[in-house]
Image (spheres, rainbow, N blue to C red):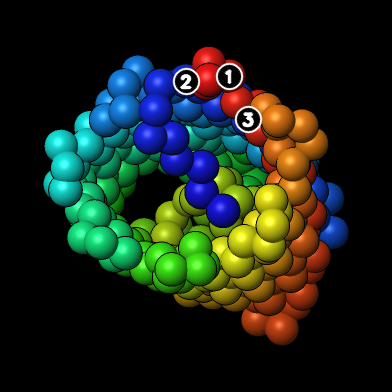
Amino acid sequence: MAVSAPAQTGYVVGLSAAADTSDGLGASALLDVAFTDRFSATLSAGLTQASGFPEDVEMGHWRLGLRRDFGPLGVEASFGEWGDPDEFESDDWSTGLFADAGPWRFAVSYLRRDFDITFRAPNFPDRRVVGTARADGVGLDLGYRFESDVDLYVATRRYDYNRDVSRLGQFEVLRRLTPTALTLTGSLLDATYSAGIDVPRDDQILSFNVSRSEGAVDGIVVDSVAIGWLLPLSLRSDLDLGLGISDEDGEQEFFFSLLFLFYGGYD
């Protein structure tokens, strides 16, 4: 479930942790600040660790996003980095438009990724060659809110690369990464698709989401199903619990997440 800036001034602090049955671990922090009822900024950072061969893989990430609502149209932009300087790095940025028309919400965005990839020959691990790749993509989001405040949404991201990245699977740096690590860090993807529903019940929110990620390396396809439960801890804090299962070529794994949210600066 996405966290967006409230329609008033204030801030949200988020702390999250995630784990899966492939020994993948992740932790991140988020600060969302609404300077006015129409202008907000979001800063997030985190670290993902996944088991690999011959060693574990750790990748960090950070992102800064800005959002300006002119009503009913608005603009948003973001820039960030993720990866490991010794293995795999990406500079990501995006810009887009969003619109609200009654119960409907729509957004379209242009996506750009610049990769630096360290290649290692399996028999000569000290020999390294740094290669580059670029991906241009487009994102589409559509949502609808019923009078009962039930939210339905669908989203997709598609990328086009300036080189044939499907051949990169022969290199040790990518063979060491598990499908879980590739998916969680948002790596070399051809496309992603997702759909979900948020259902409020009193002061709680139940959510259900399905998604598919199609990898550009070795044609990895990961299907996931997740459920979430957001419940209040106090007048200024919530806890979001998530549980899901993913499937990659008949291999299943479970994942679990915790997200703590604190709201400040509101009347």
Numbered mark located on residue 14 in the image: 3
Q: Is residue 149 visible from the viewing direction of this image?
A: yes
Q: Is residue 194 visible from the viewing direction of this image?
A: no
Residue sitting nearer the eye, 157 or 82: 157
- Left of 70 or right of it: where is 166? right
Q: Find the distance from the CA under tag 3 to the CA under tag 2.
A: 14 Å
Numbered mark located on residue 264 in the image: 1
Numbered mark located on residue 10 in the image: 2
Q: Find the distance from the CA under tag 1 to the CA under tag 3.
A: 11 Å
x and y percent of residue 160 in the render? Answer: 24, 61
Reading the chain from its start, which is encountered first: label 1 or label 2? Answer: 2
Relative to 256, say whether 119 is above or below: above
Q: At x 42% / y 60%, what residue is drawn? A: 189
Please identify the quarter of the rendering in which residue 48 is found: top right
Residue sitting nearer the eye, 104 or 164: 104
Relative to 94, say whether 192 is above or below: below
Relative to 55, say whether 135 is above or below: below
Residues packed near mark 3 inside 10 Å, few (<14), some (14 to 19) or many (20 plus): some
Residues packed near mark 2 inside 10 Å, few (<14), some (14 to 19) or many (20 plus): some
Name the amino acid, label 1.
Answer: Gly
Residue sitting nearer the eye, 171 or 254: 254
Q: At x 60% / y 66%, what residue is drawn? A: 199
Instruction: Report helix, strand or loop for mark 3.
Output: strand
